[in-house]
Image (spheres, coloured by chain):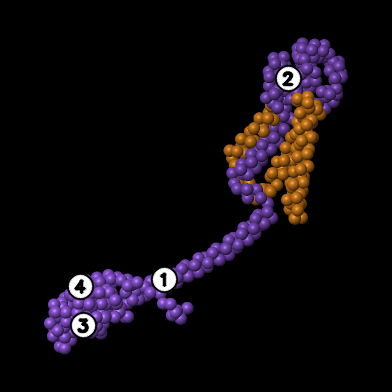
Amino acid sequence: MIAVLGLIVGVVAGLLVRPEIPAVVEPYLPIAVVAALDAVFGGLRAMLDGIFVDKVFVVSFLSNVVVAALIVFLGDKLGVGAQLSTGVVVVLGIRIFSNAAAIRRHVFRA
Amino acid sequence: MNPNEKPEEGGEKPETPETPAKPETPVVPGTPAKPVTPEKPATPEKPATPEKPVAPAVEGGESAPAASAAAPGEGAAAGAPSGRRRLADALWPPRVTRAQLVVALLLACLGFGLAIQVSSTSEGSALRGARQEDLVRILDELDDRTQRLEDEKARLEKQRSELESSSDQAEEARRQTQEKERQLGILAGTVAAEGPGITLTVTDPVGAVESDMLLDAIQELRAAGAEAIQVDGVRVVANSYFTGGGEDMRIDGTPVTAPYVFKVIGKPEDLEPALNIPGGVVQTLEKEQATATVERSAKIVVDALRPAKRPDYARSSSP
């Protein structure tokens, strides 16, 4: 419950504050958000599976974000940033879908 | 997902103790999966997946009668509620644990970033989230497009100025042609004319006026600058001829009778003296017992017309 409240608080704060994103961070924010979403879905699945460990969640969340941003950063430096970010999004999307499928089986038993 | 869980959760809530304290579970029969706390999943929950019907039996070591009693009561939904139950447990009784706090913090970060990204993507143009090389490419495309449009604009403007000048020229030529046509038409007698001039009236009570006298009058008038002449409704032009005399006077084959009324357009101050000079037209006519009266007028209308004759052989040599 507190976790859900935290999500809501974050969304509301983001909508209300609307800070100017630094130009350096700007290209990586969408990828980081997708990576974090992947971590969250993974955590939700682990919770439903009963194997949720908060430390694992924290580490996977942060490492997902960092690695995704790093890949995009590297891609930018190599000149294939657009393609690499597309690849990252595809991979994370696949993971999100499979996690969502597992969650769905838990919740709806279907 | 959460709304789906609410009803079930509401049903379970009274039975669910505020803390997952194990000793209470046997007392409450409606919580078969209660021991499966989401926060501490590490050890005994592994087999508690819904696909394994053995799970309740395994847990039954702890609260076997409760689980067996609850399963038929909840029907199909309670067959393997562990996933849902974990979710419901995690959701409803708000517990301040380290895991919840950490997850809340991270989710707050996620929500924050999500909201920022969504608002920045939706509020600004599509360019806001674009990458640097995309922006450069878009800029290049815009430059190209601008260049093309500029070229097209210059071309169209040139075309327009050409058309304007050519239409101006054509208009000017047409105007000049019309002007010329009117001048020539006055000379040729194909158009009516009006302007200052004189009216010369020749009466012939004894029938003594001959055609050469009228011709002399015409010549005199022309010499004095007459521009358009008509006599009794017959337009007098360059090739007009006078035949007969007296009662049978004809101009261009058209019979005219006295009094002969000359309508002449020209400068009245020149025309009148030309007729009245000693030994001139008026005196000659008066010698023949005819009378000639000259009357100036500010507006003479010469409206007798001659048909325009198309020459059979002669063609204009100018292009």
Residue marked by disc 1? B174
Q: Are marks 3 and 4 in contact (CB under 8 Å)?
A: no
Secondary element at image label 2: loop
Q: Residues within 10 Å of mark 1 (few under 14, many from 20)?
A: few
Q: Nearer the viewer, mark 3 or mark 1?
A: 3
Q: Chain of mark 2?
A: B
Residue at (73, 22) in percent of width and height: B89
Return the residue at label 2.
B19
Instruction: Read off the residue under disc 3.
Output: B210
Q: CA distance from mark 1 to mark 2?
A: 105 Å
Q: Among the chains, which one is purple?
A: B
Q: Secondary structure at mark 3?
A: loop
To which residue does mark 4 refer?
A: B298
Mark 4 and mark 1: Cα distance apart in space: 31 Å
Question: Which secondary structure lies at badge 4?
Answer: strand
Q: On screen, A83 above or below B202?
A: above
Q: Nearer the viewer, residue B121 or B38?
A: B121
Note whether B110 is above or below B13 in the view shown: below
Give the residue displayed 68% in from the left and 19% down from the top: B7
